[in-house]
Image (cartoon, rainbow, N blue to C red):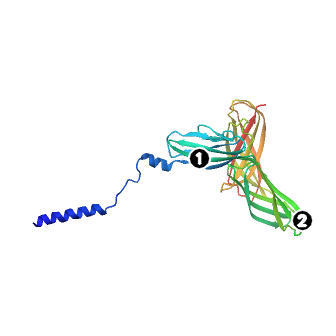
């Protein structure tokens, strides 16, 4: 009798545990759910200049990706996700992976979108110095940017115009500027931005297949407040053509990756396919802008 009671009690306990126990479901129902949750497109919105390109990418999957554009007349896309801006307007680029779609809105403009911020503006003896940053909000490399300020005295009379420019600004890059304008005995009380303008890279249709290498960079102090930077290296012509002219843009960066200066040079003589030549390029950059490295950011040639 006691044995029967023990068996009944054990049975009742087992039934009660089944009633109160939570129902546990698998965190992931199948491998597709795991993959879908991690698939991403590298950009959900872009601003491009007419004639420029950008590579969209899908990560987190090994499945086939099919690309399409809602307006090919504005922005077209290749089978591997390369977007080409055709004319001003807005288009939606869609990447289809299985039954899922991933979209990027592309805005095509004629003028780059630039913003700026002044960190310091003060008079030092006969000079007025403005420091700050320019931000490239366009997803395109720019081959020139200029910023300009009007300087005013206490009576709001313009006493000078201060400006600076560079030959290059990276896609979504930052230019750290240092403007030093001679004002003599005039006292500057205020300043106002009068121009901030950039131009898109216009060399995309030229011969651009080159291999570059920088072998050394040295800094030399000068009698002015700027340092002289000398860069040496090589450029190799990989184009299937002999070139009469080759042009190169050199960009200097600080340790934070901010652009702090540029230089542009032309080389004029016949360069056969596979030919390699040495360059020795120099640039004056304010000593307050600490240069960490230099890159050859753009090379193009002409077959005249």
**Can residue 251 be seen here?**
yes
The residue lying at 59 percent from left, 43 percent from top is 94
The residue lying at 78 percent from left, 57 percent from top is 226
Which one is earlier in the sequence, the residue at label 2 or at label 1?
Answer: 1
Q: Which residue is mark 2?
A: 157
Q: Tell me the element at label 1.
A: strand
In the image, residue 237 sits, relative to residue 193, either above or below, namely above
- The nearer-to-camera label among 2 and 1 is 1
In this rendering, position of residue 161 left or right of residue 236: right
Residue 171 spot, x, y in % from top left: 68, 49
Q: Tell me the element at label 2.
A: loop
**Can residue 140 be seen here?**
no
What's the CA distance linking mark 2 and mark 1?
Answer: 51 Å
From the image, which quarter does the C terminus lie in?
top right
In this rendering, position of residue 150 left or right of residue 29: right
Residue 110 spot, x, y in % from top left: 75, 46
Pointers 2 and 1 in contact (CB under 8 A)? no
Q: Which residue is mark 1?
A: 103
Residue 197 spot, x, y in % from top left: 78, 52
Alpha-carbon neighbours of circle 2 within 10 Å: few (<14), some, or many (≥20)?
few
Residue 236 spot, x, y in % from top left: 69, 36
Q: For the image shown, how many numbered marks are present on the structure?
A: 2
Q: Which mark is residue 74?
A: none
Q: Quadrant of residue 50?
A: top right
* Residue closest to the eye, 43 or 133: 43
Alpha-carbon neighbours of circle 1 within 10 Å: few (<14), some, or many (≥20)?
some
In the displayed orientation, state which residue is furthest to the bottom.
Answer: 154
* Residue closest to the eye, 70 or 114: 70
From the image, which quarter does the N terminus lie in?
bottom left
Q: Quadrant of residue 300?
A: top right
In this rendering, position of residue 23 left or right of residue 156: left
* Residue closest to the eye, 103 or 49: 103
């Amino acid at each position: 009798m006691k044995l029967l009671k023990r068996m009944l009690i054990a049975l009742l306990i087992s039934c009660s545990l089944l009633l109160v126990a939570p129902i546990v479901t698998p965190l992931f129902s199948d491998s597709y759910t795991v993959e879908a949750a991690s698939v991403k497109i590298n950009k959900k919105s872009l601003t491009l200049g007419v004639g420029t390109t950008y590579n969209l990418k899908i990560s987190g999957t090994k499945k086939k990706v099919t690309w399409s554009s809602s307006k090919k007349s504005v922005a077209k896309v290749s089978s591997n996700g390369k977007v080409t801006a055709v004319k001003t307007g807005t288009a939606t680029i869609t990447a289809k992976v299985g039954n899922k779609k991933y979209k990027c809105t592309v805005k095509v403009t004629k003028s780059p979108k630039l913003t700026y911020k002044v960190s310091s503006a003060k008079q030092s003896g006969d000079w007025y110095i403005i420091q700050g940053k320019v931000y490239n909000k366009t997803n395109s490399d720019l081959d020139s940017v200029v910023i300009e300020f009007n300087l005013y005295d206490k009576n709001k009379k313009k006493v000078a115009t201060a400006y600076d420019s560079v030959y290059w600004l990276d896609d979504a890059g930052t230019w750290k500027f240092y403007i030093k304008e001679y004002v003599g005995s005039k006292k500057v009380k205020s300043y106002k931005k009068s121009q901030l303008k950039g131009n898109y890279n216009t060399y995309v249709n030229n011969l651009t297949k080159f291999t570059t290498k920088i072998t050394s960079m040295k800094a030399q102090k000068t009698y002015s407040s700027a340092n002289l930077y000398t860069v040496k290296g090589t450029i190799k012509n990989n184009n299937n053509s002999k070139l009469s002219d080759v042009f190169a843009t050199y960009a200097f960066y600080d340790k934070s990756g901010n652009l702090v200066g540029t230089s542009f040079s032309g080389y004029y003589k016949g360069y056969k396919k596979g030919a390699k030549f040495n360059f020795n390029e120099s640039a004056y950059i304010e000593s307050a802008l600490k240069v960490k490295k230099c890159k050859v950011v753009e090379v193009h040639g002409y077959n005249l």
